[in-house]
Image: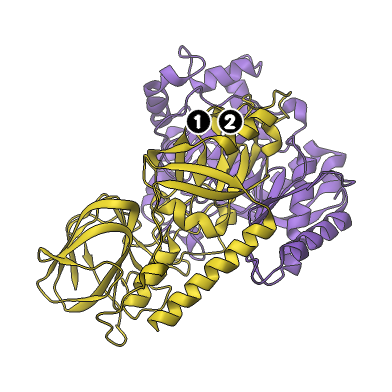
Chain colours: A purple, B yellow
Amino acid sequence: MSNADATGARYSWGADEHLFVEMAEAMSLEAYFRSMAVVTELRKRRPEGVIDICPANASYQVRFDPDTLAPDRLESLLREIEAEVGDAHDFEFETRIVEIPVLYDDPWTHETLMRFRDRHQDPEATDLEYAARINSFDDVQGFIDAHSSAPWMASMVGFVAGLPFLYQMVSRERQLEVPKYVRPRTDTPALTVGHGGCFGCIYSVKGAGGYQMFGITPVPIYDPRQELPDFKDFVCFFEPGDIVKFAPIDRDRYDELRGEAEAGRISIRKRTVTFNLEQFTADPDAYNERLLEVLNAD
Amino acid sequence: MPIEVTKPGLATTVQDRGREGYYHVGVPPSGALDQFSLVAANLLVGNPADAAALECAYMGPELHFTESTVVAATGADVELRLNGEAQPAWTSFAASSGDVLTFGYIKRGARMYLAVAGGIDVPEVLGSRATYPLGGLGGYEGRALQAGDELAIGLAGEETVGRSVPEELRPDLPNELEIRVVMGLYDHLLTEGGRETFLATSWTLTPVADRVGFRYKGAELDMVRREQPFGAGSDPSNIVDAPYPIGSIQVPGGVEPIVLHRDAVSGGGYAMIATVISADMDAIAQSAPGSNTRFVAVDLEAALAARRERAGRVSRLQGVLD
C-alpha cells in the first residue's frame, strides 16, 4: 500500500491479523492527536471482529479477526474515518490529568546507573548530569525544573504491561532529548522515571531497559494482583491519552508515600478534564496552566 | 492437590488460548505459543479446546499425581514415561494416584503441551488462565512453575483414555523451516539489497528464543541511510516508537532479526520489516535453537488462504477427537 493520501497516513498489513497505520514519520503532537482522533472515532464505531485498538505516538494499529471482519472492509473504514478527522485541529476528548510524585536523583536508580556506567555515553557523569548538559541547562536543577513544570501526554502505553511513553506538551524547541544508553542495561528498578529520544517513561516493572534514569516514583502504576484502590477495575493505571504532571518530592515524602503504598492505601491524584486541541494550540503554556489548576483544585 | 511438581523443567507455564483485548496497554495475548498442539492435547483428554494446560519448553517437568486422571502430551517429539514406562505421545492415557510422569530429551520441536482431564485450575485473570511472566500476571502466581508447586485440576468430563491424533494431523517439526511472511510495516527502510538478503538467507535460530521473541542470526541487512525523523533514534533501524504486531519481525541494528510471539513487547523503536502469517506461528513455536529458517514473502490473500487451510486442520482434529 502507498502513502499517497492527502493527509499522508500510510497503511500497511501486519500479516492477516494487524493493520498498521502511520500518521507521520516524525513525532509531533499534531500527528499524535490525529492518530488519537481516528482511534477515538473507531472505538465509537467499533465493528465486530476488532480485537485491539492500539494508539501509539505517531501511529496506531488495529488487531482484528479476519474471519469476522474482512481486511478490506476494515481498511476502508479506517480511511473513511481518517478523511473525516482531517487535520483534527479541533479534536476534543475527555481524559484524566494525574500527578506522579518523583524523587529525582534517588539512591536506587543511582546505584543502578553506577553499575552500568560502561554502557553509557558519559561514564563520568550521572544520567541527570549528562541530560542537563546536552540539553544546555546550567545545572541538574534547571533540567529537573523543565522536566517537572510542563505536563506530559501518555502518547502510548505498552512495551510491557502498563508502561506509559510520555511526550511533553511543549513546542519542539523545548523538547528534552537524550539518546538511549549505548547498550541497554539488564536491570532497571520498577517505577524508574526514564527518558529516551524525545520520550519520557515510567517503568511499570523491574527489568531490562535503555532509557536514561532520572528518578523514581513511590506510587505503583501496575498491580497484577489488583490490591491497591486505583487497580480495583484493572491491572494497569495508565491509558493512552492520560496527561501526567511530575511533582518533585524529597526523601521524607518518598518514604511516607512508599509506606502508604505498602500498606495498600495509596491513590494517585487524578482529575477528569476535557482536552481541546484548538485551545491548547492557541497558547500551550496558558492551557497547561489551566490543566494544572484543575489538577490542584481542592 | 492432584498434581505435585517435583521438578519444574526449564520453563513450564500454565497456558490456554490467551487473553485478548488488552494489547493497547501492553498486556500481550499470551497463551500457548503452539495453539494447534494445545487444542489437540485438550481434545484428547475431553477438555474444551480453550482449557488451560502446561506448556513445557525444551525440558519437561517431573510431575507426581496424587489423584487418578487422564493426561495427554502433544507438541515436540519427546520420550514420555509414566513410572519409567514409555507412553505414546498425541494419545490420552490414564495416570493413577502415586504415578510419576517424566519427560526425556526432546528429539524434534521445542515445546510440549500436557493436558489433564478437567484442565489446570488456576484463577482466571482478565478472562484467561494464561501466564504472562514478564508482567507477573495470570497462570500459577504469574510465573513459571517451581519445584514444590501444587496444581489443582478442574472438573473432568467423560473419560477418554486411548484417544489418539492420527499421524497425518500431527505437525512436521522440521529442522529446516519455510516460514511465510507478509512484507510491509517499515520494510521501505531496507535497501533493495537488504530485502533480498532477508529473503535469501537461511537464518539460524539462536538460544535467545522464548515466549517474547525468537532471535535469529545469519546475515546483516543493509538499511537505507536517511536523516532520522524527529523522535526516532539515531540508528538507521530506529523509528518513532510504534506498535508491534504479534509475529512482526524487527531487525535492531540490521542484525539478528527477532520474531515476536504471544508474550510480545507491544511496541518500541525498532523498524519491523515483515510479519509472520498467523498460520505459521505454531511452526515458529516449535522451531528449536540451531534450526534453520527461510522467510518466504507472500501476499495478504495467500496469508488468508493459509489461515483457512489451518482452520480446516483444526476442524478435522475436532472431527476425529469428538
Q: Position of residue A161 (x, y in %)?
A: 50, 51
Q: Residue at x 12, y 76 (%)?
A: B97
Residue at image x 57%, y 36%? B200
Q: Secondary structure at mark 1?
A: loop
Picture coordinates of residue A59 (x, y %)?
71, 46
Q: Position of residue A36 (x, y in %)?
A: 74, 52
Say which chain tag 2 marks: A
Q: Are marks 2 and 1 in contact (CB under 8 Å)?
A: yes
Instruction: Identify the residue shown where x is 46% and y is 45%.
Output: B213
Q: Which x, y percent locates residue B34?
A: 42, 59
The residue pinned by badge 2 equals A196
Query: In the figure, B158 relative to A234: above or below?
Result: below
Residue at disc 2, secondary structure: strand
Q: Residue at x 78, y 36 (%)?
A: A285
On the image, which quarter does residue A139 sit in? top right
Task: Give the amino acid at mark 2.
Answer: Gly
> From this viewpoint, which residue is outermost toward the top?
A124
Q: Residue furthest bottom?
A: B158
Vertical relation: B66 (above or below) A240: below
Q: Tell me the distance, in whole angstroms, between the alpha carbons under discs 2 and 1.
A: 7 Å
Provide the residue designation for mark 1.
Answer: A210
Closer to us: A147 or A38: A38
